[in-house]
Amino acid sequence: MKTVYGPVPSWRFGRSLGIDPVCRLKEKVCSYDCIYCQLGKTRHKIIRRRKFIDASKVEKDLKQALKNAKADIITISGSSEPTLASNLGEIIKRIRKASDLPVAILTNASLFHIKEVRKELSGLDIVAAKLDAPDAELFRKINYPHKSITFRRLFNGIMKFRKEYKGKLALQMMFTKHNAGHAKQMAEIARKIKPDEIQLNTPLRPSPVKPLSRPEMEKIKKEFRGLNVVSVYDARKVEVLVLDLHETEARRPEK
Ligand code: SF4
């Protein structure tokens, strides 16, 4: 299995070459089991970090992919929560060694309370941290987190990271019928965190949960007035030439 996939057309980042530091396609591991996850149910809900793949393999696969790929950015994401990889710091170093492209990560932020994780992410250009709920109850109903992750711990972790991190911090918020009525509270919490950008999303790609309509998302967007917001419905379409369809569809299933 390759550790690099895509490039994929990312509505937030353009042509994005993906890195998967976990590579568990058949038995998804994650610290969450989000109701809308496009990768299916979490088979193993874990919180303890461990090494899944060698960092040297990422460097080798990336060098190979960059011979042919046309990409604007490298995004660490893939088949699970990437911060669960205990060698993420080493993987980031290897990515930097192999390429001058900007590097981003899509993370659920569940491990931001760990100093080492925050330190590892500090070297990235963009960190997009997931936050789908404004309180503990909705957090449990939407993200089904590992029992040791409380909403308070998650929020405090993101706040700590905000204070330390010098790059671009984006908050990725997935809206469905479950939290659509809580947009005002979501905007309030975003104002406390002060991210550089807020990415308003709804599951337009295959998902067990239906997406909200454009007018519903427009209504939500209004609650974020005065903040720097991008919405999935407003995003420009990006053309990409995928290198390996099988490796890519395993992480980004299309309809
Ligand atoms: S955090 Fe991401 S990979 Fe994990 S269950 Fe949620 S959407 Fe899926």
Image: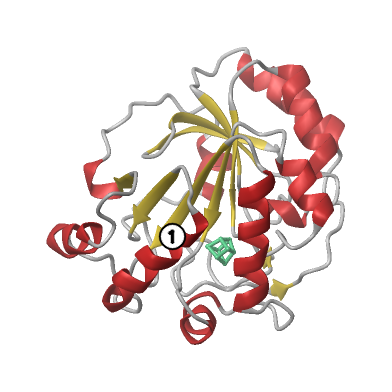
Residue shown at 24% from the left, 63% from the top: 220
How did the renderer colour the structure? secondary structure
> Between 208 and 234, which is closer to the camera in this rendering?
234
- Measuring from the top left, give residue 151's x and y in whole percent: 60, 77
Residue beneath label 1, please? Answer: 190
Furthest-bottom residue in this view: 137
Q: Is residue 76 above or below residue 40?
A: above
Q: Inspect the image, locate mark 1, and give the three-letter code of the amino acid beneath it.
A: Ala
Quarter of the figure with residue 240: top left
Furthest-left residue in this view: 215
Residue shown at 28% from the left, 73% from the top: 180
Residue 94 appears in view: yes
179 to the left or right of 27: left
Q: Quadrant of the N terminus?
A: top right
220 to the left or right of 106: left
Residue shown at 86% from the left, 39% from the top: 54
Q: Is residue 7 above or below residue 169?
A: above
User: Quick one: label 1, few (<14), some, or many (20+) residues within 10 Å?
Assistant: some
> Between 239 and 49, which is closer to the camera in this rendering?
49
Q: Is residue 79 above or below residue 196?
A: below
Report whether the residue tagged 1 is closer than 8 Å to ligand 1. Answer: no
> Between 34 and 192, which is closer to the camera in this rendering?
192
- Measuring from the top left, give residue 46's x and y in whole percent: 76, 71
Residue 28 appears in view: no
> Between 70 and 236, which is closer to the camera in this rendering?
236
